[in-house]
Image: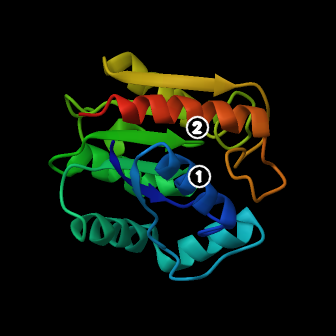
């Protein structure tokens, strides 16, 4: 059993993000889903990311830090798309991190430090032709992370959908999403 802090994507805390949390809970994990948008949800990524830009990414990171601070150490940090920013920051910088799950995004490790921390396993999942993940540098960042970190895994899925893991949006890919959940559950089962 792991304790997971799961950060939502640019649409906010959708029913699909909650469903991902339920699937991880059903596997025996404790999962927290903080709302970095304070109740706001969006129908398009453009609107959601625009709101995030208006708030400021530093504000989102501060809200992610506050959510982690309210729970204590020993967490696995997970994020979907935009939620990868606070998840990756916390996994790289917060003492006691047990692991990281980065879904559909990955930023360069240098964004939050010189190297990925020892003893913090990480999984990255994304679609191989997703214009955001594969087309905006996240895939390259994920490959660099895996090449530089012994306990890192990258899983690529065929397709070009972004937010394919969220069952509440049209871009959802049920087969790929089920495989992501299976792999994440196995990863969480290995957390000590």
Q: Residues within 10 Å of mark 1 (few under 14, many from 20)?
A: some
| Classed neighbour count for the residue bearing mark 2: other residues with Cα under 10 Å, few (<14), some (14–19), many (≥20) | some
Which is more toward the observer, 111 or 105? 105
Which one is in front, 67 or 133? 67
Does residue 103 appear to the left or right of 144 in the view shown? right
Residue visible at 63% across and 40% down in the picture = 136
Q: Is residue 107 visible?
A: no
Residue at the limit of the structure toward the bottom, as seen here: 39
Q: Residue at x 54, y 61 (%)?
A: 8
> What residue is rendered at 35% in x and 37% in y?
109
Could you give the CA–CA distance between mark 1 and mark 2, rounded to whole angstroms? 8 Å
Q: Nearer the viewer, residue 165 or 36?
A: 165
Residue 2 percent location from the top left of the image: 33, 44
Q: Which residue is mark 2?
A: 181
According to the picture, the residue beneath numbered tag 1 turns out to be 20
Above or below for 42 versus 27: below
Q: Which quarter of the figure has residue 41? A: bottom right
Name the N-terminal-most of marks 1 and 2: 1
For the residues labelled 1 and 2, say whether their Cβ atoms are less than 8 Å apart. Answer: yes
- In the rendered image, the quadrant that contains the N terminus is top left
Query: Would residue 54 be visible to someone looking at this image?
Result: yes
Residue 188, position in %: x, y?
Answer: 39, 36
Q: Is residue 77 left or right of residue 98?
A: right
Locate residue 68: give its quadrant: bottom left
User: Along the horizontal axis of the image, is 134 left or right of 36?
Assistant: right
Label 2 sits on a secondary structure element that is helix
Where residue 90 appears, x then y in whole percent? 29, 52
| Picture colour scheme | rainbow
Q: Secondary structure at mark 1?
A: helix
Residue at 67% from the left image edge and 36% from the top image edge: 178
């Amino acid at each position: 059993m792991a304790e997971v802090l799961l950060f939502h994507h640019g649409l906010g805390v959708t029913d699909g993000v909650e469903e991902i949390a339920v699937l991880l809970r059903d596997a025996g994990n404790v999962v927290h889903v903080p709302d970095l948008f304070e109740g706001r949800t969006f129908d398009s990524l453009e609107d959601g990311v625009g709101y995030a830009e208006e708030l400021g990414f530093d504000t989102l990171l501060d809200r992610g830090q506050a959510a982690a601070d309210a729970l204590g150490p020993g967490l696995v940090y997970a994020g979907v798309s935009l939620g990868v920013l606070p998840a990756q920051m916390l996994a790289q910088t917060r003492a006691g991190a047990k692991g990281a799950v980065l879904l559909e995004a990955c930023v360069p490790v240098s964004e939050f430090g010189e190297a990925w921390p020892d003893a913090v396993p990480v999984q990255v999942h994304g679609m191989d032709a997703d214009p955001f993940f594969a087309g905006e540098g996240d895939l390259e960042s994920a490959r660099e992370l895996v090449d530089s970190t012994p306990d890192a895994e990258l899983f690529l899925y065929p397709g070009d959908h972004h937010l394919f893991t969220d069952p509440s949006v049209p871009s959802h890919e049920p087969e790929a999403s089920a495989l992501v959940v299976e792999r994440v559950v196995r990863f969480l089962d290995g957390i000590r």
